[in-house]
Image (cartoon, rainbow, N blue to C red):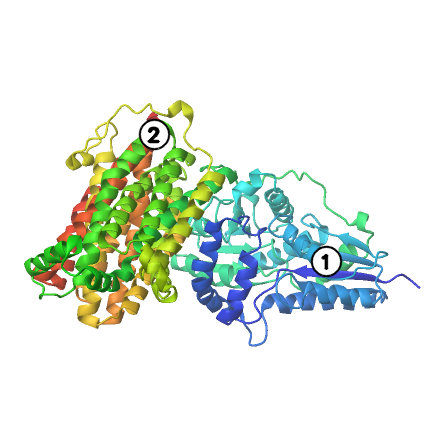
């Protein structure tokens, strides 16, 4: 009696159903696998859990619905049929001693239950065959990770021998089965071109030694050599399913289809040999989405070659060549295969972000994120703070004087006496914060150019922590003002943090780095008000009344939370940030900052900077005015409560973070900063106009969506441009000027918008803002191409 042998077919898996919940769980497991997305950064986790998982599953579930037959998905159906076909063929050949099972890496049936079944059947040898023909770290190694994890959960007998088939990209049965299917489609439909499309992969990982690309080329050459009815010049290798913002293998399948249409090609066929069974990517992405792309672009005939699935030739060939032979004797075709098939050359056009750079960006993300929390954590507290200091100080001291001035300003702006005190109160404190940030941003930038980034960041964050410490004990209004002013001064470190991003990136990926800055701003703006609102629910003066004599007040807990976050920030800088500015470039900038704010617009040494700064100021002047008066608008027209207004700002922040983290990071290198900033600025115009006419929730949120989508493109692109226009040794100063102008715009914009709003009305204010944007829109197209500067450097 022969020894029993087990065959375990491993497949990636699919969601249990097309429901959003099941799709979300699948994506969580899939994208959370460090082999699939080889990043463990805080940034990726925030993007995954804060942006992708909340929003992406709804769209993906619709794609899964298109391939759902009411009971299962193609991947499950065909993998099961393949395993059953293998078992049936083995029985025909009287190999009842060989048992075939199949399992999924994600979902059911699980690897653990199927492995245990083979053990219980008494199999002494188990051959594991992941259904990934070409070896790659993202697929094959992920399968072995799952295997190793399963072995920690199952007691594997020591006398069982494990055989791992980690590739079969040159297996004759696999190659010939695919070639036969291609020839059937070609004979029936006579396409002009055949695309051999493989799953995409980051070029960075190929250059690091992953053999996936080489295996794809070998597979393509072997299939092409067996194609009948098409010359090799009409067979094209492409790559599909790009994910993320970095450079992947090229050419893309979609881009190639569009190029073929431009060349007058109207008939194509596509085969996807990276998959053994049809799934979402082959059935929907290729068979549905790319078909639509091709036909919409002028194509007439689009044929998708099915995967080998449970094809009789493939089943019989698998038994003969993958299951029955001794492990060492599994057949493979000779390599290299001489072929005239055109092999796409892969050229790195943008520098991959190194682990060191990722750590630096992570640290700067945290620095800026916490800066924004510190700036916005106080926003939801203004009404109660006004009431508190009014009760404790009345008309005396600095508070009384400030409230008197607010009353006069409110009257001048046309507001009723006592109306919107909390808005003007918060606006004045916010303006003071921004004014001091405006003054000190270039100073910190210049100091970092001279002494290095790390010491300036350390001192400034330490100062921010001290400002939070003052706020903890600010039971007097004057101490609160001092704390906020110190916070504004120290938040001038934004220019230094932005200069760090410029230090560790180059012209090819700088705007992506600046998009990190934008995500930090967007998420900080979401988290800050929420943290402030929830922390304020804990009133230490009620829990420990004795602390009042030490200066503790009802808003101490938000200050304590801010201080803790600041200390974490400080710890990150000390332990994780390595100085990014070379000693050889420190202190070499020859230009000196002028204290005259008008001269900030003009940076004579570097073409493009002055115009870019002006555009940024004009844009942010309008944006900050809209941002500040939005609370007026939503209260006046829609009677929004504080909670509803908070959710409104959370919505804006989520859109900002989603667009910057997704679209901008992925496309800015292709579109270019100038073009993307122009598109974003154009989107702002209808966004602002809709807000002016918004008397319903849907119109308000549509306007906010366009406004946030446009702003998400403008901010990182203008920041990236100013950095590209500036030499390395002067980044801190010039970026500091840029950020300083932003602070000045945030100080002036709200006051100017309030004046227009309360004298001419909200509709007029927003329409005027939309019209005003045509000035920076016209100026953007006059910006010089930064590539010209780079070529002359």
Q: Position of residue 480 (x, y in %)?
A: 26, 52
Secondary structure beneath dot 1 equals loop
What residue is shown with label 2?
449
State if disc 1 and disc 2 touch (CB < 8 Å). no
Give me the residue at 39% from left, 46% from top.
516
Give me the residue at 68% from left, 53% from top.
144
Residue 130 seen in render = no
Residue 40 seen in render = yes
Considering the image in quadrants, where does the N terminus appear? bottom right
What residue is shown with label 1?
152
Which numbered marker is on residue 13? Answer: none
Give me the residue at 32% from left, 36% from top.
723
* Label 1 packing within 10 angstroms: few (<14), some (14-19), many (20+): few
Q: Position of residue 450 (x, y in %)?
A: 34, 27
Marks 2 and 1, how far apart at CA:
53 Å
Closer to viewer: mark 2 or mark 1: 2
Q: Is residue 464 above or below residue 602?
A: below
Q: Position of residue 313 (x, y in %)?
A: 71, 60
Secondary structure beneath dot 2 equals helix
Tell me if 740 is positioned left or right of 418 in this view: right
* Label 2 packing within 10 angstroms: few (<14), some (14-19), many (20+): many
Q: Earlier in the sequence, mark 2 or mark 1?
A: 1
**The quarter of the displayed image where residue 647 is located:** bottom left
Q: Residue furthest bottom?
A: 70
Foreground of the two, 216 or 184: 216
Foreground of the two, 440 or 81: 440
**The quarter of the displayed image where residue 361 is located:** top left
Tell me if 6 is positioned left or right of 256 in this view: right
- Tell me how many marks there are: 2
Q: Position of residue 166 (x, y in %)?
A: 70, 50
């Amino acid at each position: 009696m022969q020894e029993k042998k087990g065959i375990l077919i491993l497949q990636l898996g699919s969601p249990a159903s097309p429901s959003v919940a099941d799709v979300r769980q699948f994506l969580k497991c899939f994208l959370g696998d460090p082999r699939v997305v080889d990043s463990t950064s805080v940034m990726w986790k925030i993007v995954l859990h804060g942006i992708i998982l909340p929003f992406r599953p709804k769209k993906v579930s619709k794609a899964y619905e298109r391939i759902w037959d009411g009971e299962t998905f193609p991947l499950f159906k065909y993998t099961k049929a393949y395993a059953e076909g293998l078992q049936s063929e083995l029985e025909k050949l009287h190999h009842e001693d060989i048992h075939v099972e199949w399992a999924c890496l994600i979902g059911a049936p699980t690897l653990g239950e199927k492995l245990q079944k083979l053990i219980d059947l008494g199999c002494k040898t188990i051959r594991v065959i992941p259904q990934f023909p070409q070896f790659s770290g993202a697929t094959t190694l992920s399968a072995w990770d799952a295997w190793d994890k399963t072995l920690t959960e199952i007691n594997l007998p020591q006398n069982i021998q494990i055989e791992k088939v980690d590739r079969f990209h040159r297996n004759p049965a696999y190659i010939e089965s695919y070639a036969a299917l291609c020839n059937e489609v070609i004979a029936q439909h006579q396409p002009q071109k055949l695309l051999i499309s493989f799953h995409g992969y980051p070029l960075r990982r190929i250059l690091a030694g992953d053999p996936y690309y080489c295996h794809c080329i070998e597979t393509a050459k072997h299939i092409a050599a067996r194609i009948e009815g098409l010359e090799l010049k009409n067979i094209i290798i492409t790559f599909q399913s790009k994910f993320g913002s970095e450079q992947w293998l090229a050419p893309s399948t979609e881009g190639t289809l569009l190029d073929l249409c431009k060349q007058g090609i109207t008939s194509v066929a596509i085969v996807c040999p990276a998959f053994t069974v049809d799934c979402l990517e082959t059935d929907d992405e290729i068979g549905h989405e790319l078909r639509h792309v091709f036909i919409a672009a002028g194509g007439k005939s689009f044929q998708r070659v099915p995967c080998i699935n449970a094809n009789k030739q493939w089943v019989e060939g698998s038994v003969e060549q993958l299951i029955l032979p001794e492990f060492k004797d599994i057949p493979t075709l000779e390599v290299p295969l001489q072929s005239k098939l055109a092999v796409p050359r892969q050229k790195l056009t943008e520098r991959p972000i190194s682990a060191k750079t990722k750590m630096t960006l992570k640290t700067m993300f945290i620095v800026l994120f916490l800066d924004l929390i510190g700036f916005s954590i106080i926003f939801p507290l203004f009404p109660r703070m006004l009431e508190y200091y009014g009760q404790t100080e009345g008309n005396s001291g600095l508070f009384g004087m400030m409230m008197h001035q607010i009353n006069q300003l409110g009257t001048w702006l046309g507001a009723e006496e006592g109306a919107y005190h909390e808005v003007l109160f918060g606006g004045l404190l916010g303006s003071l914060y921004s004014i001091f940030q405006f003054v000190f941003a270039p100073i910190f930038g210049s100091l970092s150019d001279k002494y290095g980034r790390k010491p300036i960041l350390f001192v400034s964050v330490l100062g921010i922590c001290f400002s939070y410490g003052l706020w903890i004990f600010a039971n007097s209004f004057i101490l609160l003002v001092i704390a906020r002013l110190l916070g504004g001064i120290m938040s001038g470190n934004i220019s230094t943090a932005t200069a760090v991003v410029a230090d560790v990136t180059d012209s090819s990926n700088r705007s992506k780095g600046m998009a990190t800055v934008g995500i930090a701003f967007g998420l900080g703006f979401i988290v800050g008000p929420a943290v402030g609102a929830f922390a304020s629910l804990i009133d230490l003066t009620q829990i420990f009344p004795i602390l009042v004599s030490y200066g503790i007040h009802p808003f101490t807990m938000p200050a304590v939370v801010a201080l803790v976050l600041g200390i974490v920030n400080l710890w990150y800088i000390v332990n994780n940030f390595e100085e990014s500015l070379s000693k050889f470039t420190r202190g070499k900038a020859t230009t000196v900052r002028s204290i005259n704010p008008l001269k900030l617009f003009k940076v004579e040494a570097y073409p493009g900077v002055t115009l870019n700064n002006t555009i940024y100021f004009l844009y942010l002047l309008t944006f900050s005015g809209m941002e500040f008066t939005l609370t007026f608008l939503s209260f006046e027209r829609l009677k929004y409560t504080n909670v509803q207004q908070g959710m409104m700002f959370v919505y804006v922040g989520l859109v900002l973070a989603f667009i910057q983290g997704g679209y901008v990071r992925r496309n800015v290198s292709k579109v270019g900063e100038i073009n993307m900033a122009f598109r974003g600025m154009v989107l702002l115009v209808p966004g602002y106009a809709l807000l002016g006419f918004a008397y319903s929730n849907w119109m308000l949120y549509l306007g906010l969506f366009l406004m946030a989508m446009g702003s998400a493109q403008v901010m990182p692109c203008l920041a990236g441009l100013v950095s590209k226009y500036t030499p390395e040794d002067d980044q801190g100063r010039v970026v500091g000027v840029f950020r300083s102008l932003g602070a000045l715009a945030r100080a002036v914009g709200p006051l100017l918008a309030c004046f227009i709003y309360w004298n001419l009305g909200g509709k007029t204010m927003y329409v005027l803002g939309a019209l005003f944007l045509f000035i920076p829109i016209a100026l953007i197209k006059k910006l010089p191409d930064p590539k010209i500067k780079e070529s002359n450097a």
